[in-house]
Amino acid sequence: MAVNNRVKSTSDLDLKDRLVAINRVTKVTKGGRTFSFAAIVVVGNEDGVIGWGLGKASEVTTAIAKGTESAKKNLIRIPIHKGTIPHEQTAKFGGAEVIIKPATHGTGVKAGGAMRAVLESVGVTDVLAKSKGSSNPHNLVKATIAALNELRSPAMVAQNRNVSIEKVFKG
């Protein structure tokens, strides 16, 4: 049940880019080896907006710049509730499976590698996260963003159930 969380404009957002991984690719030709680079970049405003992008070029800096531009083109808004996520969520992309759980204030971001970059860029300060299966950074970033995209805010849940927000939390 993916909700359309697309962000239309990037001009009014203060986006910070974060490099997740760089991969060097070698192409062997008759004249020798040709190196190129693929960079996966995550951008976010640390207040609920995030996007990811992949840039490929023959130089590292150009690949990072292309990845940043690509990331700014597909931004989504994530509901953050008191510095953590509203509820537990799992997602899978390729061989990577991720589990993210809300945590109490002061826990910090308990996540590794690519998941940590995504969660910090979106502005989550307290979360428990686990990656299962593949540790490929490309698939981990996509699985983490898919899990974050499935989150529903307490206000949205209350509206769908036709109850008050207090009733959503208290039961």
Image: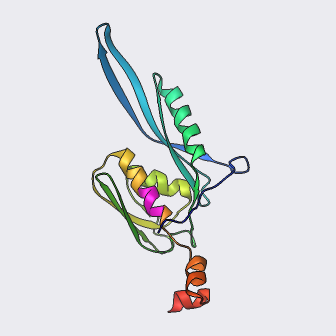
User: Up-down: is 65 above or below 36?
Assistant: below
Q: Which residue occupies 36% across, 16% down?
A: 34
For the record, the magenta segment spans 144-148
Residue 159 spot, x, y in % from top left: 61, 82
**How would you classify the magenta stretch by its main secondary structure?**
helix
- In reply to whether residue 147 is colored magenta, the answer given is yes
**118 or 95: nearer the eye?**
95
Tell me the residue at 42%/57% (across/down).
144
Front position in the image: 3 or 166: 3
Residue 42 belongs to magenta span: no
User: Which residue is at 67% across, 53% downward?
Assistant: 8
Is residue 70 found left or right of 113 in the rendered image? right
Name which residue lies at 57% across and 67% down.
79
Coordinates of residue 127 in the picture (x, y in percent): 45, 67
The image position of residue 68, as x and y in percent, is 56, 39
- Identify which residue, 150 or 21, lies in the foreground: 150
Q: Quadrant of residue 101?
A: bottom left
- Return the x and y of residue 98 as percentages of the image width and height: 35, 61
Q: Residue furthest top?
A: 31
